[in-house]
Image (cartoon, rainbow, N blue to C red):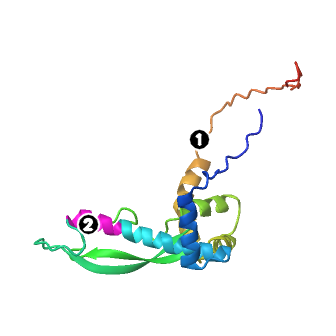
Amino acid sequence: MANRKKEVYKPKPMTEGKRNIIQGLIQEYDIETADDIQDALKDLLSGTLREMMEAEMDEHLGYDKYERSSEPNYRNGTKQKRVRSKYGEFEVDVPQDRQSSFEPQVLPKRKKDISAIDDKIIAMYAKGMTTRQISETIEDIYGFEVSEGMVSDITDKLLPKIEEWQNRPLSAVYPIVFIDAVHFSVRDDGRV
C-alpha cells in the first residue's frame, strides 16, 4: 500500500478584498513579528466571540441592544471571562441579563478552554509523558500555564475506562492471518 501524504491546507487565491483586509490588519495592529500576529488573532477572536454572544443575547431577550422593552428581564452589563485557546489566553466580555437566564452557546458557562486541550493532554499522557512534562509542553506551545493537578484531573477521568479495557476478558482463540507479498514495478509503454 502506498504511503499517503498528509493533506495540507492550500490557501485560496489572493483577492483584492483579502489584500485590503491584510493591509488593514497590519496597520491596525502594527504587525512586525509572528508574536504580533498571535496577539492580533487573540484580539480578533475575543471580539468575534463577544459579538456572537451579543447576538445570542439579542435572540434570548427578543430585542436589540439599546432598544426599550417592557420585559422584566433586560441586559445587565458584562462580565470578564478568561479563555484559553490555541492562540493563548485572553479575556472576553460576556454579556449578562438581569435574571441570569442567558446561556451562551458559543462559549458556554463554566467553559474556559476552547482549544480542545484535553485531547492533547490525553495524547501526551498516552505517549508516556509525566504530568510535569505535559504541563511544561502546554505552556511552551500555547503560552498558558496548565497545572500538574489539572493534567492529573484530566487523565484521572479516563483511567477507569483504560483499566476497564485492560481488564476485559480475552477470548481463548484469536485467529491470525499472515499475508506475504512481493511488489514489482513493471514498466509498460513508459508507465509504471
Q: Is residue 27 above or below residue 8?
A: below
Question: Badge 1, how many Cα within 10 Å: few under 14, some, many 20+?
Answer: few
Residue 74 horizontal/vertical position (percent)? 19, 74
Q: Quadrant of the N terminus?
A: top right
Report if residue 111 is visible in the image.
no
Relative horizontal placement of residue 105, taking residue 11 as reference (left or right) = left
Q: Which residue is mark 2?
A: 58
Residue numbers of the magenta segment: 53-62
Residue 115 horizontal/vertical position (percent)? 53, 64
Relative horizontal placement of residue 172, taking residue 185 as reference (left or right) = left
Residue at the location (59% across, 74% down)?
26
Q: Quadrant of the C terminus?
A: top right
Q: Are marks 1 and 2 in contact (CB under 8 Å)?
A: no
Q: How many numbered discs sit on the rendered protein?
A: 2
Q: Which mark is residue 137?
A: none
Q: Which residue is mark 1?
A: 169
Relative horizontal placement of residue 49, taking residue 174 as reference (left or right) = left
Q: Quadrant of residue 125?
A: bottom right
Residue at the location (50% across, 75% down)?
43
Q: Quadrant of residue 111?
A: bottom left
**Label 1 to label 2: alpha-carbon separation:** 54 Å
Question: Badge 2, how many Cα within 10 Å: few under 14, some, many 20+?
Answer: some
Identify the amino acid type marked 2: Asp
